[in-house]
Amino acid sequence: MKKGAGRWEWSIMAGNGPGQRNGPRTRKFLVLFFIIMAVLILASSYVYYQNYEKNYKLEIDHQLIAISDLKANELVDWKTEQMGDAGIFFHNPVFTSRVRDLMNDGNDTETREALKAWFEKELKYNQYVRAYLIDTKGTLRLSVPDTQIPVATPVIRELPRVLVSGNITILDFYRDDHDQKIYLAIIVPIYNDQEQGKPLGFVCFQVDPEIYLYPFIREWPGPRTSAETLVVRREGNDLVYLNDLRFSNHSALTLRVPLDLTEDPAVKAVHGEAGIIKGSDYRGVPVISAIRDVPDTPWSIVVKMDKSEAYGPIQEQILLLIIIVSILLISIGTGICIIWRQESTMFYMEMFESERALRKEREKTRTYLEIVGTAVIAIGPDQAVIMVNPAGCRLLCRSEEEILGKNWFDTFLPVRLREKSREIFFRMMTDATYLPEQVENVIVTAIGEERQVTWHFSLIRDEDQRVTGTLRSGEDITQRKLTEDTLRRVNQKLNVLSQLTRKDLTSQIFILSGYLELAKNQLTGQDQILVTLEQCDEAARLINEVLEYSKDYQDMGVKPPKWQNLKMAMLLGLSHISISEVQYHLEMENLEIFADPLLEKVCQRIFENSVKHGGHVTRIRVWHRITPDGVIIVFEDNGIGIPCEKKEQIFVRGDFGARDSMRSLVFVREILDITGIAIHENGEPGKGARFEMNVPDGAYRNSGDEAREEN
């Protein structure tokens, strides 16, 4: 330990020289010292354990709720997707005419083959295992695969309700009469538009839940021996499990639980409760569960695990804490006994033995600090670090020699946080009643990396109870923060891309199918057929273009942000477009910003906007200026500018599809927002467009700064 560290460790012993330790006064002090240390150790251990237990249980709760929300949202998306796929056949005049022809003439081979082609396409691209057409009496008229297996009784019973609703209906989990397997069915009513909407029959798509639903429900992030997901529904006075259970085979649609067994979290779920529930599951085993309804379905979802597994690490932490406290108390008690015994020896021998005992205590204290898993740092009244344990060295990526004696705020905190943190320190030093329970802030490591840390504080006092410094213990929570923020932003971006892309693909495929149908009916004129086929080819080309644009953005937010030279990103963006007649000036040689790896695409889209929509643009200039809040990067052109009413519309998603969205500035804002960079347009209409990117403090630097930090 360094000189400063020694002062901190043994300041409580100040004023007790060898001559003062003789007699009853010294013995009383030793007893009092042991009592105080024992109380402090036990109290701090209790507080630590309480905080650990609380935070650990909250973490388990958050995990279960996150999993239940994920699975519920996925089930809703699955249902919406199935309804959308079936909607292709609902009030489709081309398909309805084919059904009408087959109903009028069951031997119409051409119509039968055409309908089979429609069904085979649906089976190929979706999760269906069978598609069939039945009339209003439930008689099977057409099936793909071609089979005469009769229609299941639950489907027949559902047909009158479908006619009453007049809408596409999903038949919930049911057991088939023929093969005794569990299925779902999507039933589409077909109406004869030529006879005032008279029902013609029904198209049914049979879904095998083992293809997607059951595997998704069983899936669990990470290895767990007791965790499982249950999907249940209410039937009369019973609860019915809709999927097979981890500890009960063949339980789907078979295992039932009376609704008066309210200790079962699944029963609470069908009663409408939501959130974290503790109780006993179908095995009678205590569990902790997250329950909620699945919107727009009769299902409830239960995500659970055994309490013994969920809270197992807490018991391990108790055992470890008991061992550490026992070692500390025994060590302190042993040291005090040694000192007590030496009180009866000669004065000079006492001096010698007392010094040796002090050395032992220092080593024991240092050992305690070394085995503590959190960073422990002491700061003196001059703001310099006077003590740091090995965990603190690892956190700062520096050796003990590189840390001790350095100003804590000027060396280890980012510029933007120094003054605020210094004010908190000075208040603790001067106001004995002020002591923050917990503070979160950022430290800077030796390699320039920022880490988010949660700090707990205590005060260092001398023998007169004057505050001589602060002691802080910190836990690195960077990864947890990053995980919560990446997950949230990436899900937002990917959901937008998925929705837009699917909308375009569905529209183009439907158009392509329509044109191909027209081509079959136009065999009498070859010229007309050629035009139709060319339109089909154009639709296919547009589909391919959407997919190619999607490829550019499939990694948005997935790869971590990084420091990038802005001028190089602009040059790479310019390399993808043709601006041979436009002069450009890039005025930022060494500026680097912390942004998503798709920064190159951002620059490309901004330049494309000027060339495509700016009129006769002949000059583009990019420059920047430093502000107290960060840096502003300005893109200017000398085109026609953007009308005031459209300045925000160009960044907002509209009704256009994925291809147009990706070419517009919608995704520019989405990509920049991943690292907190804002963009807006404030040019004067008629005098050119002007885009400003606001990069926050700490997210920009000059390339020379990195080299100076390394030196």
Image (cartoon, rainbow, N blue to C red):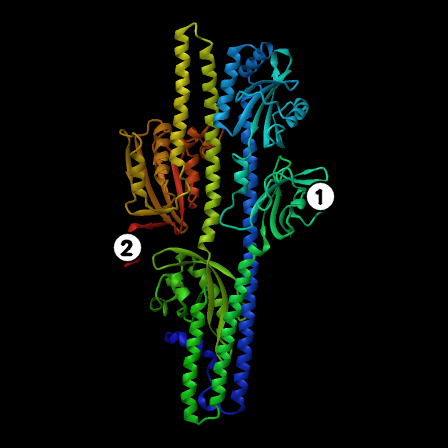
Dividing the picture into quadrants, the one containing residue 531 is top left
Pick out the residue farthest to the bottom: 346
Tell me if mark 1 has few (under 14), some (14-19) or many (20+) residues whose alpha carbon lies within 10 angstroms of its own. some
Q: Is residue 710 above or below residue 138?
A: below
- Figure check: 705 above or below 551: below
* Residue underneath mark 2: 707
Counting from the top left corner in percent of width and height, residue 633 is at 36, 43
- Residue at the image position 54 percent from the left and 90 percent from the top: 24
Query: Looking at the picture, how far across and down is residue 627, in whole percent?
Result: 38, 49
In the rendered structure, the answer to whether residue 462 lies left or right of residue 570 reads: right
Using the image, determine if residue 17 lies above or below residue 542. below
Q: Quadrant of the N terminus?
A: bottom left
What amino acid is at disc 1? Pro
Secondary element type, mark 1:
strand
Task: Residue at 41%, 80% (x, y): give it.
Answer: 359
Location of the C terminus by quadrant is bottom left
**Residue 653 appears in the figure:** no
Question: Which residue occupies the extreme front position in the image?
Answer: 179
**Tag on residue 579?**
none
Return the disc, 2 or 1, that comes first in the chain's sequence.
1
Q: Amino acid at mark 2?
A: Ala
Instruction: Give the residue pinned by disc 1.
Output: 258
